[in-house]
Image (tube, helix red, strand yellow):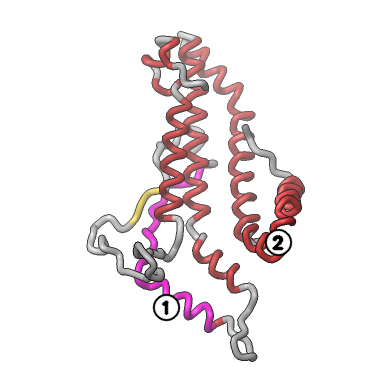
Amino acid sequence: MNASHGADDAFEKNPGLCIAPAVMSRMKIFSDEMAKYGESYSFKCNDGDIAPVFVEDPDEDSDEESFYIRKEDDPEGLVDILHPQESLCYPLHGETKDWLLQVLKDNQGFELGTFNASILAIVIKKQSSKWEDISMGFVSDAIVLVHRFITSALVSIYDDRNVCEVLVGKLSDELTRRYQNAIASARFLLNVEKSNTPITMNLLEQGPSSSTTTVDNRVRGTRRGGCNVLY
């Protein structure tokens, strides 16, 4: 776990034991994908004092218009609980202004200049529509890496393949339960973040002094959901 892979020859013989760099690499990919492709509509800004503009995608003629959310192959026995492979489209470019104007129009009130206060939640819900698939792809890949590490560790300790298979069978039920808990926890956190008022909006409305209370309330709400983080 501390990435001291030179301490034992087993790390060279079985790359599946090198879990730390594998997880860190997958986390970096997840972070990059969320930053670049996580939004439904893309905003781009010019340098300098010019206001943000909406531009067309310079690579719109490229054949690569989507990306895959899974980077690891599912091991046998976990296919049914892991998120399936999916292809998601890149963010739309050049259509953001029209979309925002339509959202504003759909939420205007009778009084001049008024609109529904939930307009931010509506925009966030649309913009975050790919969050769940990207996040579930990451969680599923992390589970694959952990499962591969466990099986690789058993193989490195026991030379007898039959013994390893028996041990994996003994651990199977408990591991599956923990994997399912991890998936449920991730889904719960996504639902909390997408269905409630964004925490940034809470802080803006209530003032800086309420930041601690807001975070505490969010944590208590997470605990009430009955989902515990796996590891």
Residue 225 visible in the current orientation? no
Query: Where's residue 212, x and y in %?
Result: 73, 50
| Residue at the (35%, 67%) spot, across then down | 93
In the orientation shown, which residue stands out farthest toward the front? Answer: 49
In the image: residue 223, left or right of residue 173:
right
Locate residue 209: give its quadrant: bottom right
Viewer-nearest of labels 2 and 1?
2
Residue, x 39% and y 40% (percent of image)? 71
Q: Quadrant of residue 58?
A: bottom left
Q: For the residues marked 2 and 1, what is the alpha-carbon distance in whole angstroms?
A: 32 Å
The image quadrant where one finds the C terminus is top right
The tag earlier along the polypeptide, 2 or 1, is 1
Q: Which residue is mark 2?
A: 207
The residue range painted magenta reads: 82-105
**Mark 2: secondary structure:** loop
Regarding mark 1 in the picture, which secondary structure is present there? helix
Q: In the shown orientation, is residue 188 left or right of residue 165?
A: right
The kind of residue tagged 2 is Gly
Q: Residue at x 38, y 53 (%)?
A: 87
Q: Is residue 75 magenta?
A: no
Given residues 218 and 112, the one toward you in this image is 112
Where residue 191 sits, quadrant-wise, is: bottom right
Query: Crowdedness of circle 1 by 10 Å Cα count: few (<14), some, many (20+)?
Result: few
Dot 1 corresponds to which residue? 98
